């Protein structure tokens, strides 16, 4: 039974995370695939660059919701298994991030997973999310690099989760969730890291011209 619960949480979480909201918005609003422009992602930042702030806001809200729904589904599945509850949320939330990054519905070409991870984190540990969010906002506001803010916020999530675990405020499963998600986020930002080091990374607000 417990195996079926984990399979359900992972499969449903992955499918929810795979919903390509950025691609859908691009095709509806401009008849384009946003992944063919800018950074090649389908997340908020690339949508803002290609389609504008309003479209980016819609994608942001939807991607956050994907993570929250995936973790919420896992919450429901494991509500009667308190011994495995934290592990279930970890599995469902991480699966949503994987789905966003490698979505089955659009050829496994997705985004960076930051907003979907944030949505899952709000359900898994809202306090950690609230602690990390200001860091992201401050870094982006000062540097205008969303990628830098995302990477540092991901690392901060792991650190805060670890501190909370040491003081018995969060279970080990949530530390592993943070480590897995941060690894995925950083791995998906490899190109951004190279551009940050060479000074060629695009700043937020810079538009991508569409022919």
Image (tube, grey):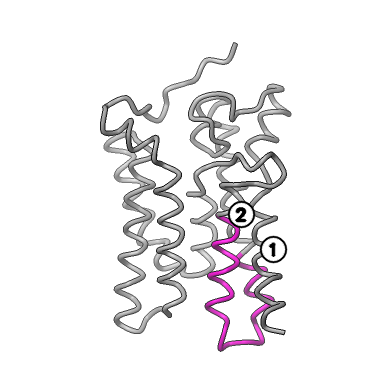
Image quarter in which the C terminus is found? top right
**Between discs 1 and 2, the one toward the N terminus:** 1
Decide whether residue 128 is among the magenta residues.
no
The answer to whether residue 73 is magenta is: yes
- Residue 139 drawn at (x, y percent): 30, 43
Residue 180: name its quadrant: bottom left
Residue in view at x 27 percent, y 27 percent: 199
Disc 2 is placed on an element classified as: helix
Query: Residue 151 at x, y = what percent?
Result: 36, 48
Between 206 and 177, the residue placed more toward the observer is 177
Q: Residues within 10 Å of mark 1 (few under 14, many from 20)?
A: some
Judged from this view, the residue extending furthest toward the top is 211
> Residue at left 58%, top 57%?
67
Q: Magenta-highlighted stretch: main secondary structure?
A: helix
Judging depth in this view, the residue of 39 and 102 nearest the camera is 102
Q: Is residue 189 above or below residue 54?
A: below
Specify the quadrant that holds the N terminus: bottom right
Query: Residue 17: percent from the left, percent from the top?
Result: 63, 53
98 up-or-down from 105: above or below: below
Left or right: 35 with respect to 77? Answer: left
- The residue lying at 50 percent from left, 20 percent from top is 208
The magenta span reads 71-97
The percent position of residue 49, horizontal first and vertical second, equals 50, 26
Which residue is tagged 2?
65
User: Residue, x 55% and y 44% (percent of image)?
Assistant: 60
Disc 2 crowd rating (10 Å Cα; few below 14, some 14-19, many 20+) is many
Give the number of the disc on residue 188. Answer: none
When asked about the image quadrant of residue 178, the answer is: bottom left
Q: Nearer the viewer, residue 58 or 40?
A: 40
């Amino acid at each position: 039974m417990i195996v079926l619960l984990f399979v359900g949480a992972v499969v449903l979480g992955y499918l929810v995370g795979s919903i390509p909201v950025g691609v859908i918005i691009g095709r509806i609003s401009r008849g384009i695939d946003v992944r063919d422009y800018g950074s090649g992602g389908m997340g908020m930042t690339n949508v803002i660059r290609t389609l504008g702030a309003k479209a980016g806001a819609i994608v942001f809200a939807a991607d956050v919701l994907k993570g929250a729904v995936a973790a919420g589904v896992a919450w429901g599945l494991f509500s009667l298994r308190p011994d495995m509850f934290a592990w279930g949320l970890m599995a469902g939330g991480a699966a949503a991030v994987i789905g966003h990054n490698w979505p089955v519905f659009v050829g496994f070409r997705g985004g960076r997973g930051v907003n979907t991870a944030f949505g899952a984190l709000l359900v898994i540990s809202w306090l950690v999310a609230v602690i990390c969010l200001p860091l992201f906002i401050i870094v982006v506001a000062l540097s205008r690099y969303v990628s830098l803010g995302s990477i540092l916020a991901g690392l901060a999530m792991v650190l805060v989760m670890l501190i909370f675990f040491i003081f018995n405020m969060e279970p080990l499963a949530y530390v592993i969730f943070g480590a897995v998600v941060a690894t995925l986020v950083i791995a998906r930002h490899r190109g951004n890291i190279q551009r940050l080091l060479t000074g060629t990374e695009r700043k937020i607000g810079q538009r991508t011209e569409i022919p």
